[in-house]
Structure formats: C-alpha cells, structure tokens
Amino acid sequence: MNYSLYHQKIPMSLTDLKKRKNKTPRAKMSVEEFIEDANNYAFGQPSTMGLTKKKTKTASSVNSKKRTSKIYRHATFTLTETSITQLNALASHTTLAKSKLIRIMIAEFSQKSAKELEAIMQQSEE
C-alpha cells in the first residue's frame, strides 16, 4: 500500500470543517419592492421579502424570548477619548455593562424638559 498520501500535510482551517447551510434562492423583486424593503430596514421594521419565512419562526420562539428579555439592536457611534474613559470608569464602578449605561443615560436624557436639555447642551460646549 502507498501511505504517502496520508503523510502529506494539507492546509486546513476550522472554517473548512464548518457545516454550511444550503442557500435558498431569493425571490426576484422589483425596484419599488427593493426601495420599500430598504426603507423598512432603515426604520427598524421587518423585511417584507422574508416575512412569511420569519413569521413561522418568530411566532413560536420569539414570543417566549420576549417574555424573558428585551429585543436589542446593534448600533455603532463615535465617542471622544474622554467619553470612553468616563464610560469605562462608570462601568467598572457600577458593574453595569456599557451598553446598559448608555441606555440608562438616553432614557434619563429623554425625560428632560427643553429648558433642561438646553442647559445640559450649553454645559457640554464649555
């Protein structure tokens, strides 16, 4: 028997071992449908194209998840170095996640009156 094939080194990564799902072909859509779907995405609404598939999936599984936790969306924004340092200090002092601290701050900020908001904004510019 020839064992030389077994001794050859074949480059391989863990992604090569990952089982891939078969992709189902997407339904064709018109330009108007594409734009409407993009608008829905921009406003945080569900896609109109994948609605039927997602409804059966979400009807049973998401309803139970909603009872136990809130639905969050990923957001990307820019902070100054000072803000990052302050947020890190707050997070370590309070032992709360940074994202939770930001949600708390947004909720508090949104409860302020127009006059209070103006005063806060003037202070931050100084």
Image (spheres, rainbow, N blue to C red):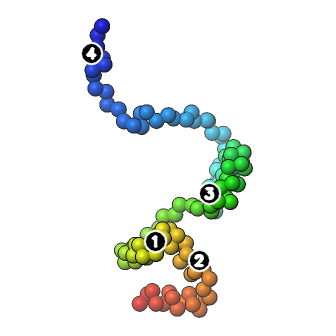
Asked which secondary structure carries label 3, the reply is: helix
Could you say which disc has been placed on residue 41 in the image? 3
Q: Is residue 124 above or below residue 77?
A: below
Which tag is nearer the camera, tag 3 or tag 4?
A: 4
- Which residue is disc 1 drawn over? 95
Say few, some or many: other residues with alpha carbon within 10 Å of mark 3 (under 14 / 14 to 19 / 20 or more). few
Say few, some or many: other residues with alpha carbon within 10 Å of mark 2 (under 14 / 14 to 19 / 20 or more). few
Residue shown at 55% from the left, 72% from the top: 103
Mark sitting earlier along the chain (4/2): 4
Which tag is nearer the camera, tag 1 or tag 2?
A: 1
Query: In which quadrant of the rendered image does the N terminus lie?
Result: top left
Residues under labels 1 and 2: Cα distance?
19 Å
Mark sitting earlier along the chain (1/4): 4
Mark sitting earlier along the chain (1/2): 1
Q: Position of residue 18 (x, y in %)?
A: 46, 35
Which tag is nearer the camera, tag 2 or tag 3?
A: 2
- Which residue is disc 4 drawn over? 4
Asked which secondary structure carries label 2, the reply is: helix
